[in-house]
Amino acid sequence: MTEMSRLNLVMEWLTVAFVALLLASQVHSDEVPYEHMLSQLQACPKECHCPPSFPNAVYCDNKGLKRIPVIPPYTWYLYLQNNLIDVLSTDALRNATQLRWINLNRNKITSEGLEVDALKAMSNLVHLYMEDNLLSSIPSPLPVKLEQLRLSRNRISKIPVGVFSGMDHLTLLDLQSNKLQDDAVTEVSLKGLNNLIQINLAKNQLNSMPLGLPPTTTQIFLDGNNIEKIPVEYFKGLPKVASLRLNRNKLANGGIPKNVFNLSSILDLQLSHNQLTEVPVISSGLEHLHLDHNKIKSVNSSDICPSGALDDYLDENSPRLRYLRLDGNEIKPPIPRDLMMCFRLLRAIVI
């Protein structure tokens, strides 16, 4: 083999190695065929950025866009937040059938500007962000594989009947800071959320606890509403509730049945900024309790300590409370000694 042939062979080997290394650096958890990557980069809208190191992502955020450009076919992650888009058109996304994630936060999209089937066409979509827009209703129909739907800070006042039909993959529904009233959040309107884990209905216009939450619900956020009472058996059909937030409502002692919060599943209970004068009965498994900014005057171990806790000093079922917040009440130090004896795992108390 001549020196020139040997040199050519080495150059060819180095070229192959370089290309392989380059492609490897550009592929994340899933392999992207070279021809797909090339097609994707060539079809990148001039208004957007398509980084070769992340070929499935298209960045069109903060561009002052009034419309959605035509999106390349191999896009998985599409960022369109912080623009002036007021219409979600079917045409712009017609080719983007592989979309997994789309961020449309902080635009001007109205329910009228949402073209029929514009979302349904995204059959692989799992995350939909449409926060800070002008929607008056939950978009319909929705992609059936959706796992997270974030619609906070819109103008949503209704949930169309059947909008969640077949949405077995949806685990997170964020409707914070909208205009939902009691008649909008019902068992009928929420039907179909068979695997929901977290629901955020904070800062709406609810006067009552929402009805129809699925039994899979683990986290319920209801801060900043006008809720005055909790039905006696409200949590009977919610055996998995671990976190409940009812801060900034209108709850008084009379609106809280004696054992309504004595749930074995609950770990985090937040009742800050209400009108309570007494500490509600809690379960021994509760770990975080927020009671700040109420009208509580005193805390006695007989009031707050779960029954039998002082007797079972070494019992593995003894109270698990680790964080207790009582500031903003009318309680005066010092903290009662028997309270500390009850909650031996307490790591922080704010008073």
Image (cartoon, helix red, strand yellow):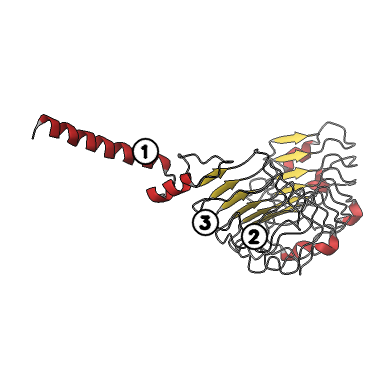
- For residue 118, the mark is 2
* Front residue of this view, candidates 23 and 276: 23
* Three-letter amino acid code of the residue under disc 3: Gln
Q: What is the number of callouts on the image?
A: 3
Earlier along the polypeptide chain: callout 3 or callout 2? 3
* Three-letter amino acid code of the residue under disc 2: Ala
Residue visible at 71% across and 62% down in the picture: 238
Q: Is residue 135 visible?
A: yes
Residue visible at 18% across and 34% down in the picture: 8
* Front residue of this view, candidates 39 and 217: 39
Tell me residue 185's x, y (percent): 79, 62
Give the residue number, with chain letter if any, for mark 1.
Answer: 22
Disc number lying in front (3 or 2): 2
Tell me residue 348's x, y (percent): 71, 35
What SS does tag 1 mark? helix
* Three-letter amino acid code of the residue under disc 1: Leu
Image quarter hosting the C terminus: top right
* Front residue of this view, candidates 274 and 23: 23
Residue 19 quadrant: top left
